[in-house]
Amino acid sequence: MTKPLILLHEEALRATHPVFNAAPEGTRSIFIWDDSYFRKLDYSLKRLVFIYESLCELPVDILQGDIVSVIKEIAPTQLYVPASNKPPFISMMDNLKSIANLHIIQDEDFVTIPTTTELKRFFKYWSVAEKTAFRKNGDRDA
Amino acid sequence: MRQLQKKFDDRNHLIAHVKSLAPWAEGASSHIEGGRQKAESKLSTIDPIGYCETRNFGDGKITKLSPYIYHGILSLNEVRNYALTKCGDPAEITKFIQELGWRDFWQRALFAHPNWAWNDIEDYKTGFTADDYADQLPHDLVEGKTGVACIDTFIKELMHTGYIHNHARMYLASYVIHFRRIKWQVGARWFLKHLLDGDLASNNLSWQWVASTFSNKPYIFNLENVHKYFETLVDTSPNSNKALSATYEELQARLFPNLRVAP
């Protein structure tokens, strides 16, 4: 029997994020208020308040605790997590891989570009990106 | 594990609750409120055409959507889609779409190169090496008491609200790195602590762009530039901003003496 879980983080605080579609209908979603994680990021109070009040509008349970410990306690078989490029997040995901089958879900794309696009300077990127940047849904529907 | 409450009588109670969860967190809350409702309300008032014409000015028609975009409360896609409904021809909002593109670019760049977050991507192009830059943020900067009036105003706004205009961010970053010769990483960490939209990719790679470790030359500014864009908002008198009151040639010579061409 599968036991899925959605683990939200601070960069994916909307109910229409693709992670909600990726997980089976009715999957529980949680946000773990991890004090040591926030301390490492050294956020000021205004940042924490902004996150908390955004969470209050979402269909998500806010659980206080250490991220890995809480996931171990819930023990999901399938874990759905929005993607992030933050190094602390990436190392956290490495820790969670051994606990559950991990699904990292990207947010919807802004533009449609080849994965080989040059990212060393903005205007190299833009010369490719502008072909779809002005189209609804970045031309994904085309 | 404890399930935390989500219902509060008012915002003050919510703020007190967060304070109790993180008594170590510095400062006070911002007047800028989180949540999808606030985000949608702000999105409904954007003026993408006006943005293109006035975005560089402190009192220009900027959207202030970035805290909501960073937290994924709004996606770049839906902001773009909405903006397209506010113009007759997408060409009218080129700069608006391009600014969204900058954020997409930073995100993709860091996904592809996670080591770019805190390491110099290239050498400084200032005539100095990384070792020539300080590792600490001096107290006068943290407290907004540098003696440069416009810089102090921007710092206090950052501390108080967690948001400052993008142009002011560039001034502050340039002041920290080039006028005070402090490592960009120190300034980037300071911004991430306070900016409600503080995003590792956009923030750090922008700091690297100003530093010249992710661009072809250092970004500098002078008082005339601040006066042009922020005259109505900050004190731009030369007497209150002596460090900035110079031509670009003078600043270039003063800030980057090693780059001077021998006669």
Image (cartoon, rainbow, N blue to C red):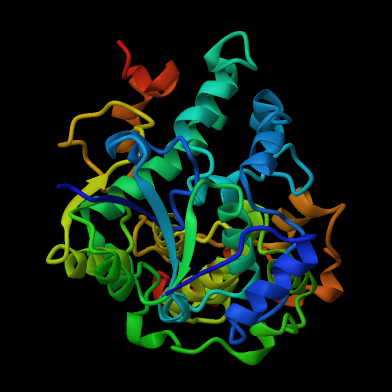
Is B236 left, or right, of A125 in this rendering? right
The residue drawn where x is 57% and y is 23% is B82
Q: Which residue lies most toward the left here?
A: A98
Is A25 left, or right, of B3 in this rendering? left
The quarter of the image holding the C terminus of chain B is bottom left
The quarter of the image holding the N terminus of chain B is bottom left
> Is B262 in front, or is B152?
B152
The residue drawn where x is 50% and y is 81% is B181
Q: Which residue lies most toward the front here?
A: A1
Is residue B257 visible in the rendered image? The answer is no
> Is A9 in front, or is A20?
A20
> Is B77 in front, or is A60?
A60
Q: How many marks?
A: 0
Q: On screen, A15 above or below B204? A: above
Query: Residue B5: horizontal and vertical position, in percent?
Result: 60, 64
Q: Quadrant of residue A111?
A: top left
Is residue B5 visible in the rendered image? The answer is yes
Q: On screen, B74 above or below B230? A: above
The residue drawn where x is 25% and y is 28% is A113
Query: Residue B77: horizontal and vertical position, in percent?
Result: 45, 30
The residue drawn where x is 34% and y is 80% is B130
Q: On screen, A80 above or below B16? A: above
Query: Residue A137: horizontal and vertical position, in percent?
Result: 40, 21
Q: On screen, A27 above or below B162? A: above
Query: Residue A103: horizontal and vertical position, in percent?
Result: 21, 48
